[in-house]
Image: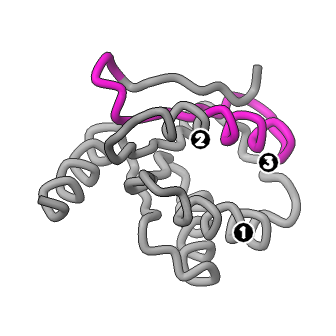
């Protein structure tokens, strides 16, 4: 399966959507819908990591417009925390920065490693207190 969903750990407050190899928007949307269904069952904010470490360098077409729409919709979820895109790829980082600009996404950011992503999530949680 090119796009999978799992909890980061047993605390169930970070959802990981992992991309592997070639993927398409339909596969992402199915995974995103599943993640959203998991998140709304919680009474607290749920953060997300989009893991592109093992994804193909080929990005589906319309990435800026579709990604921007997904970012806007994600910010409308009642208990959505921040979403961190993890990738060492400068290309993926640049695409996400463009999506952030186009969508004016306040809760979307990037990190090069899981450690960086977890630090960003922890910083965001501290600011919420």
In the rendering, at what x and y percent does residue 40 appear? 51, 40
Q: CA distance from mark 2 to mark 3?
A: 25 Å
Occupied quadrant, residue 63: bottom right
* Marks 1, 2: nearer the viewer: 2
Q: Residue under label 2, please give it.
A: 36
In the rendering, at what x and y percent does residue 55 appear? 67, 36
Q: CA distance from mark 3 to mark 1?
A: 20 Å
Please tell me the numbered disc located at residue 69: 1
Residue 101 vertical placement versus 36 (above, below): below
Residue nearest the viewer, comparing 129 with 96:
129
> Going from the N terminus, do you reach mark 1 or mark 2 first?
2
For label 2, the crowd category at 10 Å Cα-Cα, with few meaning under 14, some 14 to 19 and many 20 or more, is some
Q: Residue under label 3, please give it.
A: 58
In the rendering, at what x and y percent does residue 96 appear? 57, 65
Q: Secondary structure at mark 2?
A: helix
Image point 84% across, 53% down: which residue?
60
In the rendering, at what x and y percent does residue 3 appear? 70, 30
Q: Secondary structure at mark 3?
A: loop
Image point 68% across, 61% down: which residue?
70
Q: Quadrant of the N terminus?
A: top right
Image point 11% across, 59% down: which residue?
129
Q: Which residues are magenta?
A: 9-34
Occupied quadrant, residue 92: bottom right
Q: Is residue 103 left or right of residue 124?
A: right
Q: Secondary structure at mark 1?
A: helix
Image point 53% across, 38% down: which residue?
51
> Going from the N terminus, do you reach mark 3 or mark 1 first?
3
Residue nearest the viewer, comparing 64 with 88:
64
* Whether label 3 touches label 1, CB < 8 Å: no
């Amino acid at each position: 399966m090119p796009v999978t969903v799992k909890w980061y750990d047993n605390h169930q407050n970070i959802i990981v959507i992992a991309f592997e190899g070639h993927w398409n928007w339909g596969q992402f949307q199915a995974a995103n819908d599943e993640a959203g269904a998991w998140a709304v069952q919680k009474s607290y904010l749920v953060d997300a990591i989009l893991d592109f470490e093992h994804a193909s360098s080929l990005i589906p077409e319309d990435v800026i417009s579709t990604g921007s729409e997904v970012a806007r919709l994600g910010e409308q979820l009642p208990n959505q925390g921040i979403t961190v895109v993890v990738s060492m790829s400068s290309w993926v980082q640049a695409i996400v920065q463009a999506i952030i600009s186009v969508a004016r996404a306040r809760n979307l950011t990037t990190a090069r490693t899981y450690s960086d992503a977890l630090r960003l999530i922890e910083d965001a949680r501290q600011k919420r207190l």
